[in-house]
Image (spheres, rainbow, N blue to C red):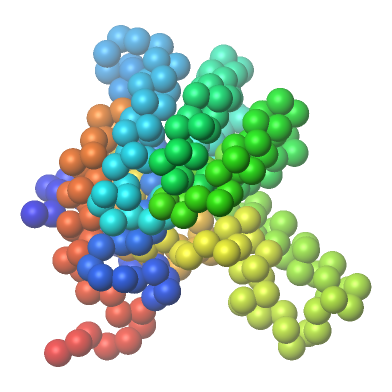
């Protein structure tokens, strides 16, 4: 049964579509602050509970047939939040890396980080690199975490790299196509998301995977991220399986 509080938008890459379920799920994890406010607690409390939810969802994905999971952890716009909230979010990410690296490695999870790392602390950058190196041989689940990520920024950085390669003769004008630009994205080598889920009831994409989600199915749920359970993910996957994805072609008869 489709979740009663969802809305449908578009249609992800034909390359990922094996079977009826999504191979790649991307999630905009929204609603931590509201969850805490509703309970009379500081916003940072919601982020701490949300971090625990990440652990549950990551561990459930392989059993649900999801091979790729991308999580929107911190956007380029999130720096506008209070200093206390930003420090909390960065601290939670550090603790997640420290506590989960060995566990995820044993469970066969490969971790990648996307986004512009230049603004992050050197310590956090080192921890991210260490986690990526420790898990790089794994293949049971590919977990991508977007940190200081914005899709427009990603596209602009990829375009600058493409322009530089053209100017320096490493690429011909004829070779400067969609594939060439895609290969310069942070997500190069990863399939496009089949399903993008946003929690909290907001129905916007908030600068997340704009290039990659051109043909993704979207599902918006009113459930706040700290309340988003494995069963909610299962329902989202079931809802996805009932959609017909045509990628611009006519409907099958």
> In this figure, what is the number of numbered marks?
0
Quarter residue 199 falls in: top left
Residue 167 visible in the current orientation: yes
Give the side of residue 167 with respect to residue 14, left or right: right
Q: Relative to 250, does residue 97 appear above or below in the rendering?
A: above
Quadrant holding the C terminus: bottom left
Tell me residue 149's x, y (percent).
59, 44
What residue sits 61% from the left and 77% below the top? 178
Residue furthest toward the right? 168
Quadrant holding the N terminus: bottom left
Residue 221 visible in the current orientation: no
Tell me residue 241's x, y (percent).
20, 64
What residue sits 29% from the left and 42% below the top? 60
What residue sits 52% from the left and 62% below the top? 190
What residue sits 36% from the left and 79% below the top? 247
Q: Nearer the viewer, residue 200 or 180?
A: 180
Tell me residue 210's x, y (percent).
51, 59
Q: Relative to 108, does residue 164 appear above or below in the rendering?
A: below
Residue furthest toward the left? 1
Give the side of residue 236 with respect to residue 179, left or right: left
Tell me residue 131's x, y (percent).
60, 37
């Amino acid at each position: 049964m489709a979740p009663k509080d969802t809305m449908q938008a578009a249609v992800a890459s034909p390359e990922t579509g094996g079977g009826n379920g999504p191979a790649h799920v991307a999630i905009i994890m929204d609603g931590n602050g509201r969850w805490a406010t509703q309970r009379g607690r500081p916003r940072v409390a919601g982020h701490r509970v949300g971090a625990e939810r990440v652990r549950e969802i990551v561990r459930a994905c392989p059993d649900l047939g999801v091979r790729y999971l991308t999580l929107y952890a911190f956007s380029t716009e999130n720096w506008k939040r209070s200093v206390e909230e930003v420090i909390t979010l960065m601290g939670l990410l550090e603790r997640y890396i420290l506590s989960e690296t060995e566990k995820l490695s044993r469970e066969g999870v490969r971790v990648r980080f996307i986004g512009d790392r230049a603004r992050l602390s050197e310590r956090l950058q080192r921890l991210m690199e260490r986690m990526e190196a420790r898990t790089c041989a794994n293949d049971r689940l590919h977990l991508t975490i977007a940190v200081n990520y914005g899709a427009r920024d990603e596209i602009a950085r990829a375009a600058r790299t493409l322009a530089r390669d053209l100017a320096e003769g490493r690429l011909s004008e004829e070779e400067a196509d969609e594939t060439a630009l895609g290969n310069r994205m942070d997500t190069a080598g990863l399939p496009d998301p089949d399903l993008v889920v946003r929690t909290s009831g907001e129905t916007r994409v908030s600068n997340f995977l704009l290039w990659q989600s051109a043909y993704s199915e979207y599902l918006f749920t009113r459930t706040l991220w700290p309340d988003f359970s494995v069963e909610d993910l299962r329902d989202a996957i079931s809802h996805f399986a009932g959609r017909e994805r045509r990628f611009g072609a006519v409907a099958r008869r």
